[in-house]
Structure formats: structure tokens, C-alpha cells
């Protein structure tokens, strides 16, 4: 059954970058919905890492391979190139050292996929400019004092980091759940609510 319509938009797009039958590691896999979808539709060999007890239990109920693990402790238990693709959706900005996590993702996986809220989006800029306060919205639904997002970044910030680390961007996409769909390709840093990146260490021929 095609259940793309119930899947978060960034994940619906990201699945297109994952090859059928490949080995996938999903970091911060939540309740396992995405990993389960990949197993059912692409027959991937998937593993998830998660720290939340309720989410882990939900993964187990789905029959998924899930390991309880704090991602800020790194991925030292995994060998180089253990996976074809390592995924981190909407969690990179919650890491204490996101640049280190990115290095680890590209050590453990031949490729990686990351998605994150784009703080350069025009709504975030406008809210900060007009109110002088950190934005709270569907995109960023937390107050500044209780947000798990400790490293906000923009599309331009992330691409600068990739250039600094000599990381190749295989694909980039920005998506919007509700609006600005016609302008995101023209100015992704301004009109993209969520950024998606497909990365590797070198161009693969």
C-alpha cells in the first residue's frame, strides 16, 4: 500500500535517494514509521538508533531492529562503511556537535541523508525582525527556553559546512508543508521550510 500521503514531506522526498535492498541506519528513528516504510516498500536491511523508551517500544512492536543509544556519544560501535545510507531526519540541529555527527555518519555510511528546519526561511526572519523574539510556529514549535533545537542553521550555513569539510552534495531539496511551493527552487534559503541533503565524501561515478 502506498502511504506516502501520511508520511512527513521531507521523508517522502528522502526515500527517493535510498536504493532498494540497501543497508540503512536511521539515527533518531522515532517510532520507526519511516524505517518500517522502507522495509515494506524497498526491502532495505534497516537498523534504528533511538533514545526514547516509548519510541523504542513502538519500533519493537513494528518488528524493527532498534538499539537504544544517545547519538551525542557517537557511532563508535559501527565500523567504517557498515551501511549504504545513514539517515538523520529533523535531529541534526538537536546534537551538541552536529559537525562531528556528520563526520560519523559519513564514516559509517557510504552516503548520508539529513533533513533539518531551515532557520533562514522568510517566516522565521520576519517573526524575529517584527517581534524581536525567537519564532514559535508549526515549523519551530518551541519556546527558546525549552527547545531541543540547540544549533539552528540555514541552507547557506549547512552548505558552507559541507564545503569546509569537503563533503559532496549529491542532491539538495527544500520542501514546504503548506506554502511558498513555487518559490523554493528560486531562492531555497528564503522559501524552503525544511532542507534535505543527500551527501557523500566524494563524487561517486
Image (tube, rainbow, N blue to C red):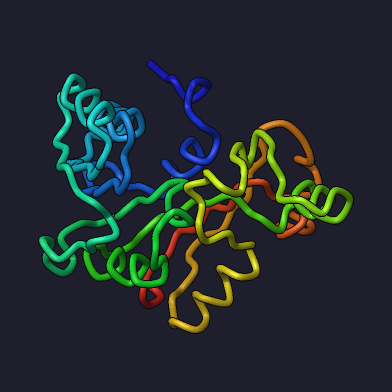
Work out whether residue 205 can be spotted.
no
- Position in image of residue 145 (x %, y %): 56, 48
Q: State the residue in front, 171 or 143.
A: 143
In the picture provided, is 177 more to the left or to the right than 92? right
Establish if 188 lies above or below 79.
Answer: above
Quarter of the figure that contains the C terminus = bottom left
Q: For the point 56% across and 68% down, which residue is it?
A: 158
Q: State the residue in front, 79 or 58.
A: 58
Residue at the top extreme? 1
Quarter of the figure that contains the N terminus = top left
Query: Which image quadrant for residue 107?
Result: bottom left
Establish if 183 lies above or below 44.
Answer: below
Work out whether residue 96 can be spotted.
yes
In the picture provided, is 204 more to the left or to the right than 173? left
- Position in image of residue 29 (x %, y %): 31, 39
- Position in image of residue 198 (x %, y %): 45, 59
In the picture provided, is 39 more to the left or to the right than 198? left
Amino acid at each position: 500500500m502506498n502511504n506516502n500521503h501520511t508520511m512527513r514531506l521531507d521523508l517522502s522526498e528522502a526515500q527517493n535517494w535510498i536504493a532498494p535492498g540497501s543497508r540503512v541506519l536511521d539515527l533518531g528513528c522515532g517510532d520507526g514509521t519511516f524505517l518500517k516504510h522502507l522495509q515494506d516498500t524497498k526491502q532495505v536491511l534497516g537498523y534504528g538508533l533511538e533514545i526514547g523508551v516509548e519510541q523504542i517500544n513502538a519500533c519493537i512492536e513494528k518488528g524493527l531492529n532498534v538499539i537504544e543509544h544517545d547519538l551525542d556519544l557517537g557511532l563508535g560501535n559501527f565500523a567504517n562503511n557498515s551501511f549504504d545510507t545513514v539517515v538523520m531526519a529533523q535531529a541534526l540541529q538537536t546534537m551538541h556537535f552536529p559537525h562531528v555527527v556528520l563526520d560519523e555518519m559519513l564514516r559509517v555510511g557510504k552516503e548520508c541523508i539529513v533533513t533539518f528546519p531551515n532557520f533562514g526561511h522568510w517566516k522565521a526572519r520576519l517573526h524575529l525582525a517584527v517581534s524581536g523574539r525567537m519564532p514559535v510556529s508549526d515549523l519551530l514549535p518551541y519556546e527558546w527556553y525549552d527547545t531541543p533545537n540547540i544549533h539552528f542553521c540555514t541552507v547557506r550555513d549547512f552548505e558552507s559546512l559541507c564545503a569546509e569539510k569537503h563533503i559532496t552534495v549529491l542532491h539538495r531539496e527544500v520542501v514546504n508543508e503548506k506554502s511558498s511551493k513555487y518559490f523554493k527552487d528560486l531562492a531555497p534559503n528564503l522559501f524552503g521550510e525544511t532542507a534535505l541533503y543527500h551527501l557523500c565524501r566524494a563524487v561517486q561515478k
